Amino acid sequence: MKNFFKKLFFVLLLAFIAIQFFRPAKNKAEGVSANDITTKYTVPQDVQAILKTSCYDCHSNNTNYPWYSQIQPVAWWLDDHIKEGKRELNFSEFATYRIGRQYKKLEEINKEVKEGEMPLSSYTLIHKDAIPNDQQKLSLANWVTTLRDSIKAQYPEDSLKRPQKKPEAK
């Protein structure tokens, strides 16, 4: 039995070493994207600091990787997390979203932060500075509300709603 555990440990160790050679591509872009939210809308400096500290690692094209991201399978987990975050909301590509999606995403930002859903607790376990305090939440909420009001004043109401799928013909 002791021999079995020795062999098992050796196999697991070899597997752990082998997976270190299979790394996901890094989420690193050079500079600010031409489609970044800051290229389309005015983002106050305090709000930009909140977004960079609390949101951009998972919701932009530029992640600051911690040391533990060099270890598999952690890097795969982080990569999956980042891809999911960018699929949901990508500040680096925000200007490419249709206006209705931008409007909706701004509403979701406000809701998620107010309810403490974002940033994720799995992220803030290690990144304590990413937890916005009450003043930061208020600044973010005020900016989002002002921006949404501005969008609402500029665009027809039907352009701010999700397009309805047409019923299929029988």
Image (cartoon, rainbow, N blue to C red):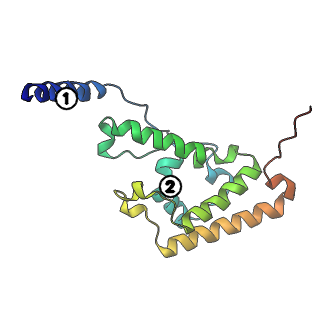
Circle 2 packing at 10 Å, graded few (<14), some (14-19), many (20+), is: many
The spot of residue 155 in percent (x, y) is 84, 57
Quadrant of image for the C terminus: top right
Q: CA distance from mark 1 to mark 2?
A: 35 Å
Residue at (49%, 56%) from the top-left corner?
52
Residue at (76%, 51%) from the top-left corner?
99
Between residues 7 and 50, which one lies in front from this camera angle?
7
63 left or right of 150 in image: left
Amino acid of disc 2: Cys
Measured along the vertical axis of the image, is residue 150 above or below residue 122?
below
Between residues 92 and 90, which one lies in front from this camera angle?
90
Residue at (55%, 67%) from the top-left corner?
115
The spot of residue 14 in percent (x, y) is 21, 24
Number of marks drawn: 2
Q: Nearer the viewer, mark 1 or mark 2?
A: 1
Q: Secondary structure at mark 2?
A: loop
Q: Which mark is first along the chain, 2 or 1?
A: 1
User: On the image, numbered disc 1 is attached to which residue?
Assistant: 13
* Identity of the residue furthest to the front in this view: 1
The spot of residue 119 in percent (x, y) is 48, 58
Between residues 63 and 167, which one lies in front from this camera angle?
167
Measured along the vertical axis of the image, is residue 151 above or below residue 141?
above
Circle 1 packing at 10 Å, graded few (<14), some (14-19), many (20+), is: few
Amino acid of disc 1: Leu
Measured along the vertical axis of the image, is residue 51 above or below residue 88?
below
The spot of residue 57 in percent (x, y) is 46, 49
User: On the image, numbered disc 2 is attached to which residue?
Assistant: 55
Residue at (46%, 56%) from the top-left corner?
120
Q: Secondary structure at mark 1?
A: helix
Q: Is residue 32 visible?
A: no
